[in-house]
Image: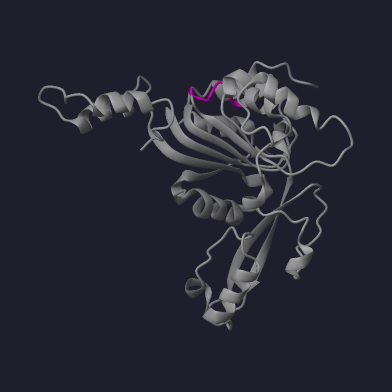
Amino acid sequence: MVDTAGAFGPIIQSVLSSSPPAGGSVDAALAGVLGANKSGKPIVDVLLLFDKSDGRLAFARDVGVFLYNVKPTQIVGVDSWESLAAELGKYSTIGRLVIWAHGTPGAPMVNAHIMAVDKLRDLLGKSKVQVTGSILFEGCDTMQKPIDMSITVARIAALGATLVGYTYSMVIRTFSVPKDKTVEQVQEILDDYEGYWVSETDAKKIAGKDTVLHQRWFREELDGTPLPEDSAERAGFVKLKDLRGPEDGPIATAEAAQKFEKQYDGPERHPGYKVTVTDIQAVAKAPSKP
């Protein structure tokens, strides 16, 4: 089912609150709203597209499964912006879109390629898909420039859709648990690194077999420093749940986006944010900086 908080929410509510069509049912009415479209393309509730040139399929899969409840069939690798747009074009509507790829401020990358903002906007727009819930970029630094990111997705974002990403660099690593660990020992490991896991966290499912888990954290700079074993030394290794939003809250206007971007003009250190744009179309109209 498509996220009813998106563009179809009011329509669905109208159908549910009205009488079923003659000789039909509410289910049939909903099918008319959600299932029928001129293109005949399907609707999907969530889709994760990942840059397969990165070579970390297992990690992308865990991000999808354990963070976003994505089914394995809804996790698709791409090797170019054109192939990503082609995958989007297979659907008429996506409830939640997750893009797992490297990034720089205002510019995600696929296969180490950064496309000009207006060209990428046009390419994605040609897919004709509409994302009704949220568009999430799982990668480094992209939301230091929310204006460029909003321009990028403006033509695939339905009214009410949100855009989410990070201002910090994201670091990932594998963590091996040997099969000789008991359930209690595995649980101690899980507890010691609580908040850093992007993997299975049920000790009973891990114990008794060689298991590779995944961790991630956020850093101001992508410096490759390993996560300290001593939890008291992990202050600069930020958990996802500890990434706060901007001080002024979600970004909903061009003016708010411009104000937010100004803090990155100078050499000052800045906190790590998880940024949410709640009005993509409004922010996309703001003048962007080179």
State whether residue 111 is above or below residue 64. above
Q: Residue furthest left?
A: 23
Asked whether, in this view, residue 14 is left or right of residue 83, the answer is: left
Q: Position of residue 278 (x, y in %)?
A: 56, 28
Q: Residue at x 25, y 29 (%)?
A: 16
Image quadrant containing the N terminus: top left
**246 or 113: which is nearer to us?**
246
Image quadrant containing the C terminus: top right
Q: Position of residue 131 (x, y in %)?
A: 48, 29
Say if residue 197 shows up in the picture: yes
Q: How many marks?
A: 0
State whether residue 245 is above or below residue 287. below
State whether residue 269 is above or below residue 149. below
Instruction: Tell me if residue 216 is in the magenta stretch.
Output: no
Q: Residue furthest front?
A: 248
Q: Position of residue 4 (x, y in %)?
A: 38, 33
Tell me where the magenta segment starts and ends, as one range. 153-159
Asked whether, in this view, residue 111 is left or right of residue 20, the answer is: right
Q: Which quadrant of the structure image shows residue 228? A: bottom right
Q: Which quadrant of the structure image shows residue 189? A: bottom right
Q: Residue at x 81, y 59 (%)?
A: 225
Colouring chosen for the image of the structure: one colour
Say if residue 116 shows up in the picture: no
Q: Residue at x 48, y 75 (%)?
A: 204
Q: Position of residue 147 (x, y in %)?
A: 69, 24
Asked whether, in this view, residue 76 is left or right of residue 234, the answer is: left
**Main SS category, magenta section:** loop
**50 or 155: which is nearer to us?**
155
Q: Residue at x 68, y 36 (%)?
A: 246
